[in-house]
């Protein structure tokens, strides 16, 4: 385990030193809310013969409630599509009851079989568009909470209570430390301080209104089925992005604080695809919430709104924000964080040697290797494997 982490850490530092893209010192959770548009899920409606223009399920997808749903929907008519093409797409047999709906995770997560397949009915579409827990989640994130920790209960009262006690204790300690840091930073830089707030949201595995959300969460990692009798925690931040799952013995002080350090630390890479996690399927006007945050922050600072930059900014972040990033990452450093990496500051410089594209290609390759190794190592670490 340690060898994997050391090797991944070594490559990560090498990639950071090589890459010409200047790091962003804005905390990950703020950057994600302001700029990371949710990835789109894919869905296919499988039917035989034309769908009626007034089909009630189709009408719901065109309603106002589904306006901001991050999903792309297409159709396949079995009268014009080869059945082997459909079975290949589904990775299995065609549903007996038609029309049917199949839903896949965003393509950025990789293509596999759909995580949900069922009848294309108004009830299924309503469950797809929204649910009570997702509404609460969206409200908290758009209100400015740093992260919401979804706890999928095991059904065993003792196990669930133990998991909640560890989680609540660590979140309370981290919140206190981060708020103290934010106050100190605001005084030193004479700028508005960031606010830090965490909350938990519990879901019963038997809740009939949350089956779509549960499918979405519990199939987001291939081995979560092994923890059907354990509580599982999913930290969610930004625009409804779940970072990864903490399960069984993986719900401990080290993994929780390590997760907090990532979410509140400086956004070292502005390319969303190089960051872990998967976006949840939600119908939320995230742009409106992000603009409100963006505007309020700079109004408090009595500064003009800066121009939004592209993915590859031409200039490095200013010194004040770099100091902010360092203090955010250091706020939790007093507790053990076995996988935490130090902050590397990159001075202004011209790109030489490979040039921008060449250096970026090398960096992306190195970071992708890190992602693969890190995913393997972290998966074992987070879920309590030796």
Image (tube, rainbow, N blue to C red):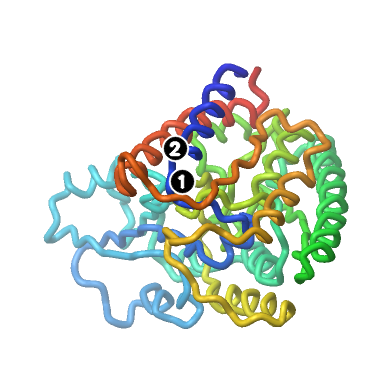
Residue 8 lies, with reference to residue 318, above or below; the image says above
- The residue under label 2 is 367
Q: Nearer the viewer, residue 175 or 107?
A: 175
18 left or right of 171?
left
Residue 31 lies, with reference to residue 126, above or below; the image says above
Q: Nearer the viewer, residue 116 or 251?
A: 251
Quadrant assignment, res 249:
top right
337 left or right of 286?
right
The reply to whether callout 1 and callout 2 are in contact (CB within 8 Å) is: yes
Which quarter of the figure is the C terminus placed in? top right
Kindly report the distance in space between the C-alpha atoms of the residues bearing marks 1 and 2. Answer: 7 Å
- Residue at the image point whose x is 31% and y is 51% from the top: 96
Provide residue 159's location: percent of width, then percent of height.
79, 35
Q: Secondary structure at mark 1?
A: helix
Report if residue 248 is visible in the image: yes
Report if residue 208 is visible in the image: no
Q: Secondary structure at mark 2?
A: helix
Q: Nearer the viewer, residue 264 or 251?
A: 264
- The residue under label 1 is 274
- Residue at the image point whose x is 41% and y is 50% from the top: 350
211 left or right of 54?
right
């Amino acid at each position: 385990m340690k060898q994997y982490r050391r090797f991944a850490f070594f490559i990560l530092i090498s990639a950071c030193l090589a890459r010409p893209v200047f790091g962003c010192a804005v905390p990950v959770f703020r950057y994600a809310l302001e700029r990371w548009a949710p990835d789109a899920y894919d869905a296919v409606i499988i039917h035989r013969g034309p769908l009626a223009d007034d089909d009630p399920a189709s009408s719901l997808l065109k309603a106002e409630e589904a306006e901001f749903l991050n999903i792309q929907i297409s159709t396949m008519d079995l009268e014009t599509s080869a059945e082997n093409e459909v079975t290949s797409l589904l990775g299995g047999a065609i549903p007996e009851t038609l029309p049917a709906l199949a839903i896949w995770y965003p393509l950025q997560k990789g293509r596999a079989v759909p995580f949900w397949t069922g009848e294309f009915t108004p009830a299924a579409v309503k469950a797809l568009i929204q649910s009570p827990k997702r509404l609460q989640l969206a409200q908290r994130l758009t209100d400015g909470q740093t992260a919401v920790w979804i706890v999928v209960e095991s059904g065993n009262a003792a196990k669930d209570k133990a998991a909640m006690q560890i989680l609540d204790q660590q979140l309370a300690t981290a919140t206190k430390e981060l708020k103290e840091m934010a106050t100190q930073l605001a005084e030193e830089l004479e700028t508005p301080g960031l606010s830090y707030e965490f909350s938990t949201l519990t879901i019963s595995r038997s809740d009939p209104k949350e089956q779509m959300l549960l499918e979405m969460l519990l199939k987001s990692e291939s081995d979560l089925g092994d923890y059907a009798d354990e509580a599982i925690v999913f930290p969610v931040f930004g625009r409804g992005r779940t970072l990864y799952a903490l399960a069984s013995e993986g719900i401990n002080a080290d993994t929780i604080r390590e997760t907090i350090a990532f979410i509140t630390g400086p956004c070292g890479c502005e390319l969303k695809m190089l960051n872990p996690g998967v976006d949840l399927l939600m119908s939320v006007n995230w742009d409106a919430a992000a603009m409100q945050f963006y505007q309020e922050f700079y109004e408090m600072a009595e500064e003009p709104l800066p121009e939004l930059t592209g993915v590859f900014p031409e200039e490095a972040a200013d010194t004040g924000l770099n100091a902010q990033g360092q203090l955010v990452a250091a706020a939790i450093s007093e507790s053990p964080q076995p996988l935490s990496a130090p902050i590397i500051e990159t001075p202004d410089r011209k790109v030489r040697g490979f040039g921008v594209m060449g250096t970026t290609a090398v960096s992306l390759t190195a970071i992708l290797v890190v992602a693969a190794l890190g995913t393997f190592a972290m998966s074992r670490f987070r879920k309590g494997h030796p």
